[in-house]
Image (cartoon, helix red, strand yellow):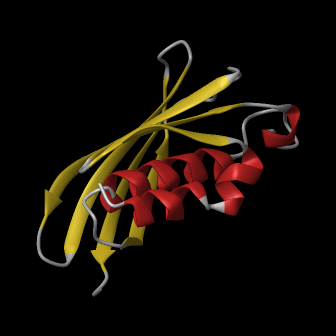
């Protein structure tokens, strides 16, 4: 794994700011988690959708970039499956298909009780070095 790419992910200031932790990263697969605080809740005391999406996007970035090629998201679709009042969210990103320039990933987001909170489908573009 490219140390430069690991450093880029660890240097993601927004992910750090909202409390995302990279748990596992290997080519085509990653797990990220975050502990939920009151600052992650919306006006009706549910986890804000953008928080869930950001966690999934970060897991995608880790899985896609672990191969050593800078890959950025060019399309993402999210389905919110269940509201979570839990204290932790975990995102698991898995590569579905990859070609020279395009990669597809599914990211599943769960809470600590293994409730399926959201599912995200992401298309990534592999940038030229």
Asked which quadrant contains residue 40, the reply is top right
Across and down, in percent, residue 53 comes to 56, 51
Q: Quadrant of residue 29?
A: top left
Residue 102 sits in quarter:
bottom left
Q: Nearer the viewer, residue 58 or 6?
A: 6
In the displayed structure, 105 sits above or below 5; it is above
Q: Is residue 10 above or below residue 79?
A: below
Front-most of 11 and 127? Answer: 11
Judged from this view, the residue extending furthest toward the top is 113
Give the residue furthest to the front: 3
Using the image as rendered, state which of residue 6 and residue 85 is in the foreground: 6
Q: Residue at x 85, y 36 (%)?
A: 44
Asked whether, in this view, residue 110 is left or right of residue 30, the answer is right
Please indicate whether residue 98 sits to the left or right of residue 36 in the image: left
* Residue 6, horizontal then vertical, whole percent: 45, 56
Give the vertical position of 16 relative to 125 (above or below): above
- Percent from the top left, x then y, of residue 72? 40, 72
Residue 84, image x and y in percent? 64, 26
User: Relative to 101, is 125 on the left or the right?
Assistant: right
The residue sitting at 70% across, 21% down in the picture is 87
Q: Residue at x 81, y 38 (%)?
A: 41
The answer to whether 72 is drawn above or below residue 89 in the figure is: below
> Residue visible at 68% across and 20% down?
86
> What is the number of callouts on the image?
0
Can you say which quadrant of the picture contains the N terminus? bottom left
């Amino acid at each position: 794994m490219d140390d430069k790419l690991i450093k880029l992910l660890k240097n993601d200031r927004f992910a750090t700011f909202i409390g995302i932790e990279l748990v596992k990263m290997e080519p085509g697969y990653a797990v990220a988690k975050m502990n939920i605080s009151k600052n992650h809740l919306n006006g009706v005391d549910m986890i804000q959708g953008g928080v869930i999406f950001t966690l999934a996007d970060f897991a995608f970035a880790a899985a896609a970039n672990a191969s050593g090629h800078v890959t950025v998201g060019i399309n993402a679709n999210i389905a919110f499956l269940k509201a979570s009042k839990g204290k932790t969210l975990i995102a698991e990103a898995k590569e579905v298909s990859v070609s020279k320039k395009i990669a597809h990933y599914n990211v599943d987001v769960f809470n600590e009780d293994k409730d399926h909170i959201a599912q995200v489908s992401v298309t990534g573009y592999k940038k030229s070095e």
